[in-house]
Image (tube, rainbow, N blue to C red):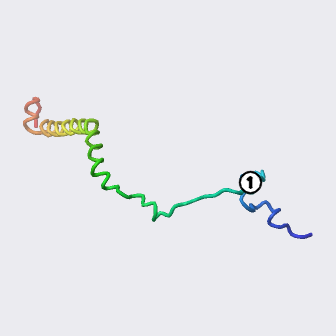
């Protein structure tokens, strides 16, 4: 008895359209081309900062009513709450509320 070759052992041989787990087989891939451009030729970050300086400020200013107004309201609520907390826990606050200090 001779040992089985790699071709008949169930291991993948060549590039198939369908994987070897399901043993579907299928024709060997032919005629598929892939092209790539070098990352040095692509230059993906060309003009990033220049584009942000001219366009980014305009975009940020457009979103200011949606993010700035809630931030300002939240800041004033936060400062009012801290001031009220400090007043209520002070000697003047206790006397104003009729409590002892």
Residue ID for mark 1: 21
Closer to the camera, 22 or 94? 22
Q: Looking at the rendering, which quadrant does residue 83 occupy? A: top left
In the image, taking residue 95 as reference, residue 81 lies left or right, namely right
In the image, taking residue 29 as reference, residue 39 lies left or right, namely left
x then y, percent, for residue 89:
14, 38
Q: Is residue 18 above or below residue 90?
A: below
Q: Which residue is at 31% across, 56% downward? A: 49
Q: Residues within 10 Å of mark 1 (few under 14, many from 20)?
A: few
Closer to the camera, 97 or 53? 53
Q: Which part of the image, by quadrant, shows the N terminus?
A: bottom right
Q: Is residue 77 above or below residue 13?
A: above
Closer to the camera, 20 or 56? 56
Among all residues in the image, which is located at the extreme top? Answer: 98
Among all residues in the image, which is located at the extreme bottom? Answer: 2
Closer to the camera, 96 or 36? 36
- Disc 1 element: loop
Q: Looking at the rendering, which quadrant does residue 77 occupy? A: top left
Q: Which part of the image, by quadrant, shows the C terminus?
A: top left
x then y, percent, for residue 34:
60, 58
x then y, percent, for residue 75:
21, 39
x then y, percent, for residue 84:
15, 36
């Amino acid at each position: 008895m001779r040992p089985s070759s790699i071709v008949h052992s169930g291991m993948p041989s060549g590039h198939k359209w369908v994987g070897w787990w399901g043993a579907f087989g299928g024709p060997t891939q032919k005629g598929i081309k892939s092209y790539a451009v070098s990352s040095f030729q692509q230059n993906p970050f060309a003009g990033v900062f220049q584009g942000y300086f001219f366009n980014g400020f305009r975009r940020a200013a457009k979103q200011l009513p949606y993010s700035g107004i809630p931030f300002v309201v939240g800041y004033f609520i936060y400062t009012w709450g801290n001031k009220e907390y400090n007043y209520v826990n002070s000697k003047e606050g206790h006397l104003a509320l009729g409590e002892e200090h």
